[in-house]
Every structure is written in C-alpha cells, then in structure tokens.
Image (spheres, rainbow, N blue to C red):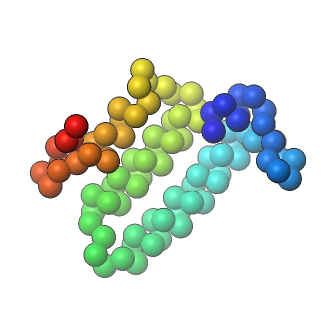
Amino acid sequence: MYQWIVHQARTDSGKKITRKLVVTLLNEEYNKLADKLAKDTKAKPQEKAALLKSRDMLEGLVGGNFQEFMSLPAYPLICHTPNGAAKL
C-alpha cells in the first residue's frame, strides 16, 4: 500500500491511490469486521483489541512509520499464548 501511494499508482478504474483513500478503505473494512465481532457472542475482548491494533499498525505503515522488521509489532497479535505472552 505504501508503495502504491508513493509511486502514485492507480486503481483499475483509474482512481489515484492516495493515503487518504487507503485510510478510508482501511477504516471501512475495519468497521465491517468490528461490527461482525460485536455481534459475535463468542468473541473475546482480546480479539476486538487485536483488530483495533492491527488497523492502527496498517495505518502507520501507509503513513511511513516503519520498523527495522515490519512484522515485529504483529508478533504479539499472531503468536500469543493463553497468558497473552508472545510465543516465537
């Protein structure tokens, strides 16, 4: 996404991909997923928190906030154990 923004890529319909467009689409998709989680009686609070954290991480990436390894902030979300610790 960041590369598309920086290099002024366009969609198939010719629309220029901007940070604003990506953040708008990201928020729309986040809201759809958050609505599904809100309706899911089996959803755990940490799932809702992880969804928000992942949205924030993606928004940071399209804004150019990079770490040495971009996957590092995601490890606690995707490699967690029941006690919440990252399992690498």
Q: Is 18 on the left-hand or right-hand side of 67?
A: right
Furthest residue toward left? 83
In the rendered view, tell whether residue 62 sits above or below residue 52: above
Q: Position of residue 10 (x, y in %)?
A: 81, 42
Furthest residue toward front? 88
Q: Is 45 on the left-hand or right-hand side of 28?
A: left
- The quarter of the picture where the N terminus appears is top right
In the rendered view, tell whether residue 3 sits above or below residue 47: above
Q: In the figure, residue 29 lies in which quadrant? A: bottom right
Q: Is 79 on the left-hand or right-hand side of 27?
A: left
Q: Position of residue 25 (x, y in %)?
A: 64, 54
Q: Nearer the viewer, residue 34 or 82?
A: 82
Q: In the figure, residue 20 lies in which quadrant? A: top right
Furthest residue toward right? 14
Q: Residue at x 66, y 31 (%)?
A: 3
- For the image, the number of numbered tags is 0
Q: Position of residue 8 (x, y in %)?
A: 78, 33
Q: Residue at x 67, y 39 (%)?
A: 19
Furthest residue toward top? 68
In the rendered view, tell whether residue 41 sits above or below residue 87: below
Q: Position of residue 51 (x, y in %)?
A: 40, 55
- The quarter of the picture where the C terminus appears is top left
Q: In the figure, residue 7 lies in which quadrant? A: top right
Q: Residue at x 65, y 51 (%)?
A: 24
